[in-house]
Amino acid sequence: ARAGMASARAALGCAALAVLCAVGVDALKFDVKVGSSRCFSDTLSKDALVKLDYEVIGAPSSNSGFLVKVETVGKNGVQVYKQTDATKDTFAFTATQDAKHDFCVSNLGNALRRVRFEVATGVAANDYSEVAKKEHLEPIEVELRRLEDTVFEVHKEFLYMREREEAMRDTNESTNSRVMWYSIFSIGGLLTLALWQVWYLRRFFRKNKIAQD
């Protein structure tokens, strides 16, 4: 039974590893000079779960001089998160719209600092240890839950990509239709101009008795 359980866990682990390639986890460490900012962008789909975890390494516990903010980009831009004198924090939110999101760190202090910055989306943003404690799940059940959520996330991403593909196809078809009609009108205009030039020249020659019928 133990051997069977171990095999099941190994199979689940391999499947989860293969599918987790579609889940986003970006962990960075970088220096921010005094008076400068570093920004990163990610396009998030509506209802996507996002977890932000950062730490200003070596900063004082207060008056760090760091500003951390997250906001959507576009005509309906919304500020999702803002923290002044930031040192470290973990923040989770759910995207309310399909939009590009900017994650920015600004050094308003008086010394260069190194920042650890991690953004996790989708399944990677879930804390399954808390889920296991709350629902009293066994390790194998936690892995099953993780795999189920991952498959759902991948399926959701495929649907989103298909919607984007359909929207792009509609845009291409509309553009092609407009180009076709523009070409037809252009050809019609050129033919009309050519006929008018022939009529004008014939009239001019007749008037000056250069050409006879």
Image (cartoon, rainbow, N blue to C red):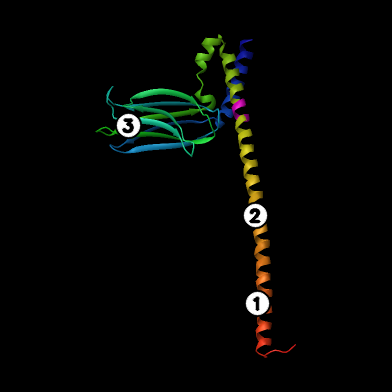
- Of the image marks 2 and 3, the number of the one nearer the N terminus: 3
Image spot of residue 41 (x, y percent)? 45, 37
Answer whether labels 2 and 1 touch (C-beta < 8 Å): no
Taking the image as shown, residue 22 lies to the left or right of residue 63, namely right
Quarter occupied by the C terminus: bottom right
Q: In this view, does 133 lie above or below 77?
A: above
Helix, strand or loop for disc 1: helix
Q: Which of marks 3 and 1 is in front?
A: 1
Taking depth in this image into account, of 40 and 1 the one nearest to the observer is 40
Residue visible at 63% across and 42% down in the picture: 167
- Of the image marks 2 and 1, the number of the one nearer the N terminus: 2
Residue visible at 69% across and 78% down in the picture: 199
Furthest-right residue in view? Answer: 213
Residue bearing mark 2: 178
Residue 72 visible in the shown view: yes
Helix, strand or loop for disc 3: strand
In the rendered structure, which amino acid carries the disc numbered 1?
A: Gln
Answer whether labels 3 and 1 touch (C-beta < 8 Å): no
Residue visible at 56% across and 13% down in the picture: 139
Residue bearing mark 3: 114
> How would you rate the neighbour count of disc 3 (Cα within 10 Å): few for under 14, some for 14-19, many for 20 or more?
some
> How would you rate the neighbour count of disc 2 (Cα within 10 Å): few for under 14, some for 14-19, many for 20 or more?
few
Provide the major secondary structure of the magenta segment. Answer: helix
Q: Residue 183 is drawn in which quadrant?
A: bottom right
Helix, strand or loop for disc 2: helix
In the rendered structure, which amino acid carries the disc numbered 2?
A: Arg
Q: In this view, does 151 lie above or below 190?
A: above
Image disc number at residue 197? 1
Magenta-drawn segment: 151-155
Quarter occupied by the N terminus: top right
